[in-house]
Amino acid sequence: MKSMAVGEFKAKCLGAIARVNATGEPILLTKRGKPVARIVPPSDEGLAGEISDSADSIFGCLRGMLKPGVDLSGLVDPIIATDEWDHLKDDFSLEADQP
C-alpha cells in the first residue's frame, strides 16, 4: 500500500483519487509519519449516491421498525409530568444565596 503525507495529498488530491480509482490500490494518508486515514476504491455495494437497503447498512437495519398507522404522538410527550418540574423555577443563582 502506498503512503502519502496529508500535506502532499492536499496538493495532489484529485490525481491521488484518480490513481486509486484506476489501480484499485489504496493510499494510506499520514501526518507526521502516523496513519490518519486510508483512501480506498469504492466497492460495488454502497457506491456514491446510492443508499444500501441491506440489513447490515445503517438504513437497512431500520427496515420494518415503524408500521403504517402507528400513533407516534407519544414521541414528543414529556417523560415526567410538567407539574413535577416546578422546582426548576426556583432561583438558584449565587446572588440569592448571599445575605
Image (tube, rainbow, N blue to C red):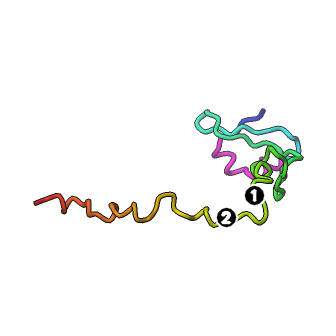
Viewer-closest of 98 and 40: 98
Q: Which residue is mark 1?
A: 66
Question: What residue lies at 63% left-to-right and 46% top-to-bottom?
Answer: 7
Q: Are marks 2 and 1 in contact (CB under 8 Å)?
A: yes
Viewer-closest of 48 and 5: 48
Question: What residue lies at 80% left-to-right and 54% top-to-bottom?
Answer: 64
x and y percent of residue 11 in the render?
68, 51
Any mark on residue 72, and which? 2
The secondary structure type at the circle numbered 2 is: loop
Q: Magenta stretch mostly in which secondary structure?
A: helix
Q: Quadrant of residue 68?
A: bottom right
Q: Is residue 11 magenta?
A: yes
Task: Using the image, determine if residue 61 lies above or below residue 78.
Answer: above
Question: What residue lies at 80% left-to-right and 51% top-to-bottom?
Answer: 60
Amino acid at the residue labelled 2: Leu
Mark 2 vs mark 1: which is more N-terminal?
A: 1
Q: Quadrant of residue 30?
A: top right
Residue 29 appears left or right of 91: right
Viewer-closest of 43 and 34: 43
x and y percent of residue 67 in the render?
78, 59
Quarter containing the N terminus: top right
Q: Is residue 66 magenta?
A: no
The secondary structure type at the circle numbered 1 is: loop
Amino acid at the residue labelled 1: Leu
Viewer-closest of 26 and 56: 56
Residue 24 appears left or right of 99: right
Residue 43 appears left or right of 95: right
Task: Using the image, determine if residue 28 lies above or below residue 64.
Answer: above
Mark 1 Cα shell of 10 Å, populated few (<14), some (14-19), many (≥20): few
Q: Which residues are magenta?
A: 4-19
x and y percent of residue 59 in the render?
77, 53
